[in-house]
Image (cartoon, rainbow, N blue to C red):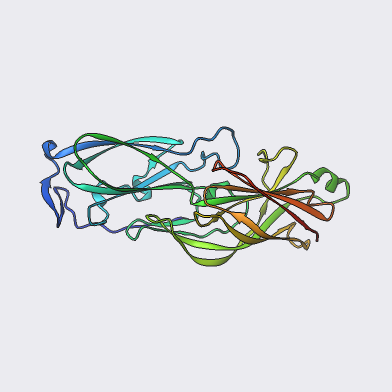
């Protein structure tokens, strides 16, 4: 269960103030401008894991010139969230002449992120493998001055890399007596991200525990089927991680994928004939995310 952390700002229902900006009666329309905010998720061209449709709860924090959350006009809790279906139009009345910044976060009700809108930090706590419900999006809008009625378009992006494992020998494995049931991964990556700077911190050895393999989705590489899909909180720049992949809990089927490239808002595809032979695995980073693709071969086995 996710948590949203915030405080009730020292702002009355009648006045919005800051130490460098004037005090205004916010109930007087003469002091207000309507700011129309168009919130958009990345364009996805096909139905697949990571198409953004699972992130349908939208939260946002609006901050004054000092970076303090203005609770009266923010929506940072489950009882006042907005519903988003890839896009959302919001209308907010802000004081003309004042400066504001904004943070947006969209996720699923089953997400495992704790969003602290006061300190502008998100904490990621994955538990199980292969859950599309972990997908999420965010955006930070830098300080801007309200000069009158205006419109702003906000593009949301993932804080995650999506890491997929696919194989082309599920049927061959079945014929040999191996029925694929579940999978897990172990990986060391980050648990916290600053929602303003995008900086990540607090590396953790995560275990995405055994869970049913993904079904009903098309693997990004033709001819292969999903056996694992997970979201990792990673840096904006490409880095490498070591991933331990295993399937069929208790069956001792374990693979090591070293130096796998991952990058925020990119998809990494690991694929090969994984179940029935020594493994030659291809690894591809692709968008949906962003471009270009990155490939490297991996050779190994059980």
Q: Nearer the viewer, residue 128 or 144?
A: 144
In this view, the residue farthest toward the top is 45
Quarter of the figure with the C terminus? bottom right
Q: Is residue 259 visible?
A: yes
Q: Residue drawn at (11%, 36%), measured in percent from left and top?
A: 30
Q: Is residue 138 above or below residue 87?
A: below
Q: Nearer the viewer, residue 5 or 244?
A: 244
Residue drawn at the location 13% of the way across and 40% of the way down: 31
User: Residue 167: percent from the left, percent from the top?
Assistant: 75, 47
Please give left or right for residue 284 compared with residue 19 in the image: right
**Residue 18 occupies quadrant:** bottom left
The structure residue drawn at horizontal position 52% and vertical position 57%, both measured from the top left corner, is: 234
Q: Position of residue 284 (x, y in %)?
A: 66, 47
> How far from the left and from the top, in percent, is residue 116?
37, 58
Q: Is residue 96 left or right of residue 90?
A: left
Q: Is residue 3 visible?
A: no
Q: Position of residue 8 (x, y in %)?
A: 25, 57
Relative placement, left or right, of 35 versus 236 is left
Work out whether 173 lies above or below 121. above
User: Residue 175, located in which quarter of the rendered image?
Assistant: top right
Total marks shown come to: 0
Residue at coordinates 80% horizontally, 50% vertically from top-left? 179
């Amino acid at each position: 269960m996710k948590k949203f952390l915030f405080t009730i700002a020292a702002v009355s229902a009648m006045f919005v103030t800051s130490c460098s900006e004037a005090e205004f009666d916010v109930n007087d329309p003469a002091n207000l401008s309507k700011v129309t905010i168009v919130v958009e998720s990345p364009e996805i061209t096909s139905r697949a894991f990571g198409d953004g449709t699972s992130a349908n709860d939208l939260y946002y924090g609006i901050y004054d010139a000092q970076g303090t959350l203005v609770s009266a006009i923010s929506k940072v809790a489950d009882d006042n969230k907005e519903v988003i279906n890839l896009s959302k139009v919001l209308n907010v009345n802000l004081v003309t002449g004042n400066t504001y910044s904004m943070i947006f976060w969209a996720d699923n009700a089953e997400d495992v992120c704790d969003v602290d809108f006061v300190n502008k930090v998100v904490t990621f706590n994955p538990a199980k493998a292969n859950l599309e419900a972990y997908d999420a999006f965010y955006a930070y809008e830098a300080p801007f001055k309200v000069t009158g009625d205006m419109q702003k378009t906000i593009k949301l992006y993932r804080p995650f890399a999506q890491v997929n494992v696919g194989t082309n020998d599920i049927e061959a494995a079945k014929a040999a007596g191996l029925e694929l049931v579940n999978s897990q991964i172990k990986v060391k990556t980050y648990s916290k991200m600053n929602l303003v700077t995008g900086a990540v911190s607090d590396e953790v050895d995560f275990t995405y525990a055994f869970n049913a393999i993904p079904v009903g989705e098309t693997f990004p590489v033709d001819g292969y089927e999903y056996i694992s899909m997970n979201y990792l909180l990673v840096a904006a720049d490409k880095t490498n991680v070591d991933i331990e992949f295993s399937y069929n809990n208790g069956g001792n089927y374990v693979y090591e994928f070293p130096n796998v490239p991952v990058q925020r808002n990119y998809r990494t595809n690991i694929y090969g004939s994984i179940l029935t032979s020594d493994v030659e695995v291809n690894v591809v980073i692709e968008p949906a995310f962003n471009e270009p693709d990155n490939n490297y071969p991996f050779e190994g086995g059980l």
